[in-house]
Image (cartoon, rainbow, N blue to C red):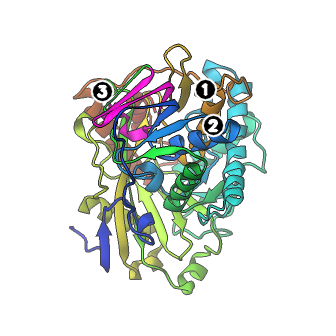
């Protein structure tokens, strides 16, 4: 590394994520051994697949539900994310309003807010201890340009019916005190979670409900009514793809959703004096209004988990499944963390890891079930999946059971978008976007408005 980054003596890079440090990375369960038939087959044992299985069994206990997972339940983004149970839309409110209506887009936003409480309630009911605290979210502006975007965001939120109780400007000194903050936004619609505890707890619950979960069983291809693996074929009336950032690894799906990398570091436990100085006395989630944005949480054991983009995309939609993080990414995240909190410079990094999230071409999530072929899917969460997976699971339940509801009427249901461009255009576009965003953030240090470079980046990729 060009700048010395202090690493703990037991520093770990990769090995899925820090969230598995307390328990160790789980050993995968039994794999599929021969052909199997079921009512519903779900490909992927992350939060989308597990929530779908959970709600199906709760609604109709007699259903035979099978989940197929290439590694172990919670191996992907569900066990690596930043632990944000956020009410933020997984896509642009304006786009949903444009393709449907303002009323439909507003209904989707309200469902996202309600889903936070739904997850909290299910965890309480099922005894899932995931360190959940609904402490809200603080988003800071650290330049004049970011502050201008902050005011525009508040004005837009008012225009679509969100009130002070949903989102408001806040005194940056009244919450978490970030160095250089010139403004802040506050919303109560966010909760902290421990990702591995949530997904592993949910996996245990669905098994107890009678769901058959086969791990170490990679699915190579999905066709109507069948999921094909090296160890046998799973047949069902419905086959649901719940593979998010790993979708590109399936036959015929390489350009469907782009696997976008995100990386995180976590510090050693910090002393109480640090938290007092930072004013971080609760479980608020912390983000910023930079284009190359960050996300952070105070963990239950008193660390800062701090994330952002590293190498955003690997050529050909490849996926580094083990979570190893490049030195320069660790360095960049550490420099950002200590820029936000100079007092944290006396600590050390305990763990670094990476994972992939799924990005559709229009950056809006989708959920769909085709009654004719029995094929369905949900995903493309663009980094907002912890909450959206639960809404997706309940929506897939209603679509599979052919039960019209307020969920099946939401504007993300049945949303179809074009595929990503072939290589090398895909690689060039994504890397150009993030290069432009980095340059825009640099320029905005001395600007009063959003850089034209950021608008160009949005135009290139349709962000």
Rendered residue at 78%/51% (across/down): 165
Does the rendering let one see residue 379?
no
Q: Judge by depth and name the residue closer to the eye, 93 or 134.
A: 134
Q: Judge by depth and name the residue closer to the eye, 145 or 153.
A: 153
Locate residue 401 relative to residue 242 in the image: left or right.
Answer: right
CA gap between label 3 and label 1 equals 24 Å
CA gap between label 2 and label 1 equals 9 Å
Comparing labels 3 and 1, the label whose residue is closer to the camera = 1
Residue 285 appears in which quarter of the rendering? bottom right
Residue 119 location in percent, x, y?
66, 51
In the image, the segment drawn in magenta is 225-251
Residue 336 location in percent, x, y?
40, 64
Q: Is residue 273 above or below residue 418?
A: below
Residue 251 location in percent, x, y?
30, 27
Q: Secondary structure at mark 1?
A: helix
Q: Residues within 10 Å of mark 1 (few under 14, many from 20)?
A: many
Disc 1 target residue: 400
Comparing labels 3 and 2, the label whose residue is closer to the camera = 2
Q: Residues within 10 Å of mark 3 (few under 14, many from 20)?
A: few
Of pointers 3 and 2, the one earlier in the residue sequence: 2
Q: Secondary structure at mark 2?
A: helix
Disc 2 target residue: 56
Q: Secondary structure at mark 3?
A: loop
Is residue 229 magenta-colored?
A: yes
């Amino acid at each position: 590394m060009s700048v010395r980054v202090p690493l703990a003596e037991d520093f770990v890079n990769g090995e899925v994520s820090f969230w598995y440090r307390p328990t160790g990375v789980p050993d995968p369960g039994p794999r599929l051994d021969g052909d199997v038939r079921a009512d519903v087959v779900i490909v992927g044992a992350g939060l989308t697949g597990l929530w779908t299985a959970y709600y199906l069994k709760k609604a109709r206990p007699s259903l035979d539900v099978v989940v197929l997972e290439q590694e172990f339940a919670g191996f992907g983004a569900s066990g690596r994310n930043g632990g944000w149970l956020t009410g933020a839309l997984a896509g642009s409110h304006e786009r949903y309003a444009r393709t449907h209506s303002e009323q439909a887009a507003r209904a989707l936003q309200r469902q996202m807010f309600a889903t936070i409480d739904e997850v909290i309630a299910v965890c309480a009911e099922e005894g899932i201890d995931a360190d959940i605290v609904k402490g809200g979210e603080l988003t800071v502006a650290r330049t004049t340009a970011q502050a201008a975007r902050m005011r525009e965001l508040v004005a837009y939120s008012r225009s679509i019916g969100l009130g002070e109780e949903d989102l408001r400007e806040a005194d940056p000194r009244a919450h978490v005190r970030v160095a250089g903050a010139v403004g802040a936004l506050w919303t109560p619609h966010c909760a902290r979670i421990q990702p591995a505890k949530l997904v592993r707890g949910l996996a245990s619950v669905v098994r107890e409900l009678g769901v058959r979960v086969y791990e170490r069983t990679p699915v190579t291809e999905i066709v109507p009514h069948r999921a094909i693996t090296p160890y046998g074929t799973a047949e069902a009336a419905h086959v649901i793809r719940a593979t998010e950032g790993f979708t590109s690894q399936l036959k015929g799906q390489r350009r469907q959703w782009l696997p976008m990398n995100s990386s995180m570091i976590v510090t050693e436990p910090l002393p109480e004096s640090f938290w007092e100085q930072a004013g971080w006395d609760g479980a608020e989630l912390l983000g910023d209004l930079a284009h190359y944005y960050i996300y952070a949480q105070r963990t239950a054991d008193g660390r800062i988990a701090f994330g952002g983009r590293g190498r955003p995309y690997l050529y050909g939609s490849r996926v580094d499944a083990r979570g190893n993080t490049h030195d320069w990414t660790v360095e960049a995240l550490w420099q950002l963390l200590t820029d936000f909190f100079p007092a944290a410079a006396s600590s050390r990094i305990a763990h670094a890891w990476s994972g992939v999230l799924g990005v559709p071409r229009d950056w809006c999530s989708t959920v769909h079930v085709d009654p004719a072929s029995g094929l369905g899917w949900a995903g493309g969460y663009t980094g907002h999946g912890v909450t959206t997976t639960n809404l997706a699971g309940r929506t897939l339940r209603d679509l599979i059971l052919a039960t019209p509801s307020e969920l099946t009427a939401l504007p993300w249901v049945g949303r179809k978008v074009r595929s990503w461009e072939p290589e090398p255009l895909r690689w060039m576009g994504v890397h150009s976007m993030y290069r432009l965003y980095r340059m825009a953030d640099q320029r905005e240090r001395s600007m009063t408005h959003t850089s034209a470079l950021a608008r160009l980046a949005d135009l290139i990729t349709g962000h």
